[in-house]
Amino acid sequence: MPIDNNTRGSRGEWAVATCLLRPLGDSDTVQFRPLFLGEKTELLDFLVLLVNKDDQALGPHFFLQVKATAGKTEDDDPSIAAKFSAEEVERVKNWKVPTYVAAVDLSRPERELIHIRGISSSRTKGIASVKKALSLDDRNVRKNIYKEVHEYSFFTAKFQNGRPAVK
């Protein structure tokens, strides 16, 4: 019996949150704290905080939208369907916070496959799919997201209103 859309969405969201809570390094230190925004929240599923080795939020954060599919994808398919309209892209760009879309392949009952892509500030079109090239299971992909979000937050804090915020 196929699962309904709500169950599929919940399974995808929990899979992504679990993946983000995996350590990035050799220790058991976690660098992300995903905060579920709730089923009634429009557009995005998580606010994800970057945390330090003492599990304290650093300030930098990003938004994440999860798109789960139970449709069978072939191993040689280069991407997974994940619709995000041009209007939705424009809305998240206006927030000026790094935003990502995670596509979760639920076609294998024993293990979800999670792939991720960022939404560029120069993007003008919607998103139809997420390429399988960047797996959220890959520790290096998560490290690069951490670095990207941290550097973005540092840059925007430094140059608020066209001048350095800290002298």
Image (tube, grey):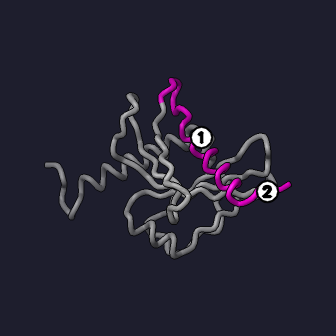
Give the residue at x 38% y 28%. Answer: 54
- 162 up-or-down from 102: above or below: below
What span is colored magenta in the figure?
A: 1-29
Per the model, the C-alpha gap separating discs 2 and 1 is: 21 Å
Q: Quadrant of the N terminus?
A: bottom right
Q: Amino acid at mark 2?
A: Thr
Give the residue at x 59% y 53%. Answer: 116
- 10 Å crowding of disc 2: few (<14), some (14-19), many (20+): some
Q: Is residue 52 left or right of residue 99?
A: left
Q: Is residue 61 left or right of residue 40?
A: left
Residue 128's spot in the image, x, y percent?
A: 64, 68
Residue 66 falls within the magenta-colored stretch: no
Residue that badge 1 annotates: 19
Find the residue positioned furthest to the right. 1
Give the residue at x 67% y 49%. Answer: 11
Instruction: Give the numbered dot on residue 66.
Output: none
Residue 67's spot in the image, x, y percent?
A: 63, 59
Instruction: Give the numbered dot on residue 73.
Output: 2
